[in-house]
Image (cartoon, grey):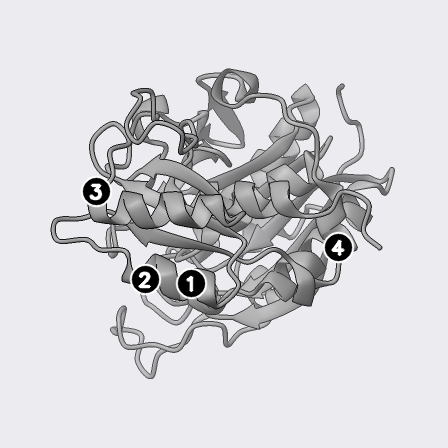
Amino acid sequence: MQNRASLIVVLGTGGTIAGTAPSAADDSAYTAAQLSIAELLAAVPELASVPIESEQVAQVDSKDMSHAIWQALARRVAHHTARAEVSGVVITHGTDTLEETAYFLQRVLAPAKPVVLTGAMRPATSARADGPGNLRDAVRVALASGRVGRAGVVAVLAGQVHGARQVRKAHPTRLDAFDSGEAGPLGVVQGDGVSWRSDPADHAPAEAPCSAALSFDVARWPRVEIVVSHAGAGGAMVQALVGDGVQGLVVAATGNGTVHQALEAALRAAQAQGVAVRRSVRSGDGRVSGPGAAGLPGAGDLSPVKARIDLMLALMPSMPA
Ligand code: SIN
């Protein structure tokens, strides 16, 4: 449905986009999460004419992203997207776990308005900072999406729009570090608008929101960990995790979902003890389609980190006590 509201809410969570270095020549030795969201917005003069409200939800290097911040962020996004005057929400975020937060918010909220995550590969103090341009593009995408009634969580970086399910950080340093794998981006930022390449519905199944994560005590969120199948893999890590009370395990499997026999035996033993197990593939693209380790369910096209979120939400009681 077309949205005539024009207010954009920008939520800050930290990251390199808010990072500072001692010198403008320094693009790598910097401290993430230093500048406030108000300071980031002040560095983008093109946004001066756009009605914007901002709020600092967190201030972290996103390698340290926590479930508690995810819950607080999801609550703020839910609050703002429910306001009639709000057209969309933009979130500034570190790039390291941006893809996880994007997928988490999509699964928990399935928002009926655009929610756009953005970040930067260079700190705000860099003479060649990419953050201001990405923030400008993110606001433009939120406005353009609202105008044509496109909703849901996307990521906007280096001029491309990526869906929450597909987006991934594919390079540690390049300015265009993000892609959507073989699905390709949803669109490309062009001037004030977006040249859309496909519809979010073509990229992701419509899934009901797992809204329990908005209220369920974070300390009791199901514990789900990731193990990797590799040459010489064994079962010791799985056994240790089961002994430590893990409730779900995602294995980043080889090939089309195959698992080293020693690891597979440990995963089957864990499953027999009530631990939920999912197989995703470690190769980056494609989906688990072969029988692989039959009886250990596949995670479809989800990457290991997104399969972890999916399983954690699936294990969360839907009616929190
Ligand atoms: C972070 O993820 O917070 C640091 C790295 C980045 O934003 O590029």
Residue behind mark 4: 76
Closer to the N terminus: mark 4 or mark 3? Answer: 4
Residue behind mark 3: 261
Residue at point 50%, 50% (across, down)? 273
Residue behind mark 2: 237
Callout 1: few (<14), some (14-19), or many (20+) C-alpha neighbours within 10 Å?
some
Residue at point 48%, 34% (across, down)? 165
Quarter of the picture for ligand 1?
Answer: bottom left
Q: Report helix, strand or loop for mark 2.
A: helix
Dot label at residue 241: 1
196 lies left or right of 234: right
Kindly identify the amino acid type of the residue bearing the numbered disc 4: Arg
Residue 198 is situated, as x and y percent measured from the top left of the image, at 47, 16
Residue at point 41%, 55% (across, down)? 95
Evaluate if marks 2 and 1 touch, with contact meaning CB atoms under 8 Å apart: yes
Closer to the N terminus: mark 3 or mark 2? Answer: 2
Inter-mark Cα distance, 4 to 3: 45 Å
Inter-mark Cα distance, 2 to 1: 6 Å
Inter-mark Cα distance, 3 to 2: 14 Å
Kindly identify the amino acid type of the residue bearing the numbered disc 3: Gln
